[in-house]
Image (cartoon, helix red, strand yellow):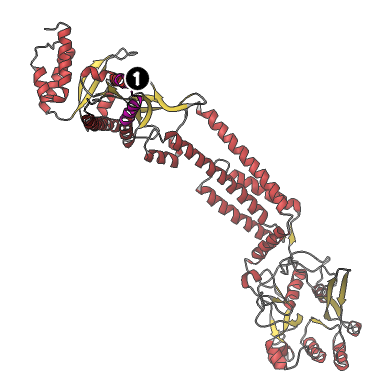
Amino acid sequence: MRMRDKPRQARQIRSRHLRLLVLSLTTLIAISLLSRLPAWSLLELRSFDYLSTVDDPRPPPGGPVIVAIDEPSLADINAQWPWPRSLHAQLVTQLRDAGARVIGFDIIMAEPSNPDNDAAITKAVGPDTVLAGDETLIETPQASQLIRATPLPQLTEAGAVTGIASVELSGDGTFRRIPGYEDGFAAMLTKVAGVAPETLPAGRLIQTFGPARSYPTVSYYQALDPKNLLPPDYFKDRVVLVGLSLQNAPAIDKGGVDAFATPYTVHTGKLVSGVEIQATIYDNIRSGLSIAEARLPTVAACILISVLLAAATVWRSTGWLTIVTSAAALLAFAAVSAAGMRLAHIFVSPLGPTVAYISVVFGQAAFDFAEERRNKRQITRAFAQYISPDLVKRLSSDPSQLKLGGERRTLSVLFSDVRGFTTIAETLKDDPEQLTGLINRLLTPLSDVVMDHGGTIDKYMGDCIMAFWNAPLDDPDHALHAVKASLAMQAAISSLNRELEQEAAMRGGRPHVLKMGVGINTGECIVGNMGSTRRFDYSCLGDSVNLASRLEGASKNYGVALLLGEETARLVAGTYTVVELDRIIVKGRTVPSPVYTVVHKAEAEALAAHQAFIAAKYAGTLVPSDPAFDRLAADMPELAGYYVIVREALVESGEE
């Protein structure tokens, strides 16, 4: 690319980079504002649901065993719920005898029942027993009231420990956090079991362990007779939780008794029983598996890194590689977030970095696409009048083939001019509409021929057309296409003459006969957008262009319609029969340039005779009386006018 293109390209790059920086800054601000919305927090929590369950974690070993009040137990016991507390007392005795370390009842016993039954459960419980309580916030227009339901006083007096089994749900009704109760049900289980941590991780995200029934579970009726219905030592030294747990987990759209949505619900659509929720909380506390949410500075740093990565991805350009890179980056964000939960127990939501990355990358891609469309429209507008629609389409689909600002290329340049058009214009000076119509009828088919043969129309100069080949798109056969176009232009002129003759006959007048001369030269030129900063044309200039113009003007001096430069003749000699006519000295040159034309019908003998004729002409041995003039005119009638002109020149010079 020429040096003059570099400042323009540098300005475009700076403009693109500035737009990218503005987009990145806007993205940071927008995500900062969006992150304050409740809906954003729920989306982050939903991403936590997927990432915390993607590897399908199972309960850690040595965790609780659940005694389920389920359908088989309801059928076997055949008693109306709630069951008599004496039955629970019997269960406590059986579990303690079976070696249970801690017994937890996720059943509220806050109201008195049958005195004998209450006495039985009071006698059975002890310091190894945790009984569930409940805390409910009642809000009314007048006030908010916190109501706490705890087990009967005689139960706690007998040594039973109270644990609040209430859980906190997120805005979408999903259980995700460790309850913030110092005397929470699971927290008290850890204390009684002797595995309590130094501090309760209240409010931290909970790690769930599979869908419903992931914990070891037996039916209530089995636990009433563990010696006969369960394997030996099944409850030995285990924490046992008793509560409602239906065999078939209720669907989320139907709800259920003491059942909640968990992160696994996004996969199964099923709710998890409250007693399994308490077992999950217990394992999170005792094993330190709960997950802390990253603080704001960490989140902000991750989003900033994401924006910088996105900017680096599209810093130079956007394309198919951008899509592949973006997909890899988004997977990396999710993988890093999941690894953070597993290895460091910290959740950094991938939502912010993902949205930031997508916003920057696809935002810049949209800008680039719009810029490309704008460039294509500019190219289409700029070249639609000069080159064929097919070439315009190629340019607009691949603008890299166009180098604006000027470049050095080898072109085949064509000049065409109508002979005697000045005389025609003089006769029509009183009828400008007819003159304009004639020019349009002349230039239209000639222009179509140029574009149909892949040429670029440089300019119109009255009745003259300047065109060239091999720019703006590469054309390896540019010389051949230029010559083909010139011959087709001659055919178009003949067709137009027939139309004009018919029209003149209908009017009873004389037709305007049009004749055209064409000059074509091939050589190195400078081609590009040339002109002022406010108006320019795609054009070419150079010594080769000047020679093409001179060839067109000289064609009438040789009695032929087409005159070719030496390089053009050489390039088309394999397709057309080209013959040399003369050597001319063009203004600005000191070395004579040979000129050629194309003949369609010529025998080998005639061509050899013509070559001998040209050699004699150059040697100065040619005389007007030479019989070669008449013989060659008969053998090659296309050059008859040329031979007449040469003979007349010899006569005028006094040659004998």
User: x, y (%) of residue 505?
Assistant: 20, 30
Q: Quadrant of residue 192?
A: bottom right
In magenta stretch: residue 431? yes
Q: Quadrant of the C terminus?
A: top left
User: x, y (%) of residue 503?
Assistant: 24, 31
Residue occupying the far top of the picture: 654
Q: With 454 as the anchor, is 156 left or right in this view? A: right
- Decide which of 124, 516 is in the foreground and name it: 516
Q: What crowding class fits label 1: few (fewer than 14 Cα within 10 Å), some (14-19), or many (20 or more)?
A: some
Q: Is residue 43 visible?
A: yes
Q: Name the residue that disc number 1 marks.
A: 546
- Tell me if residue 154 comes above or below residue 389 in the rendering: below
- Tell me if residue 589 comes above or below residue 133 in the rendering: above
Q: Is residue 57 visible?
A: no
Q: Quadrant of residue 390?
A: top left
Q: With 146 as the anchor, is 529 left or right in this view? A: left
> Residue at 88% of width from left, 91% of height from top?
119
Name the dominant secondary structure of the magenta segment. Answer: helix
> Residue at 75% of width from left, 53% of height from top?
296
Q: Which residues lie in the magenta part?
A: 426-442
Q: Secondary structure at mark 1?
A: helix
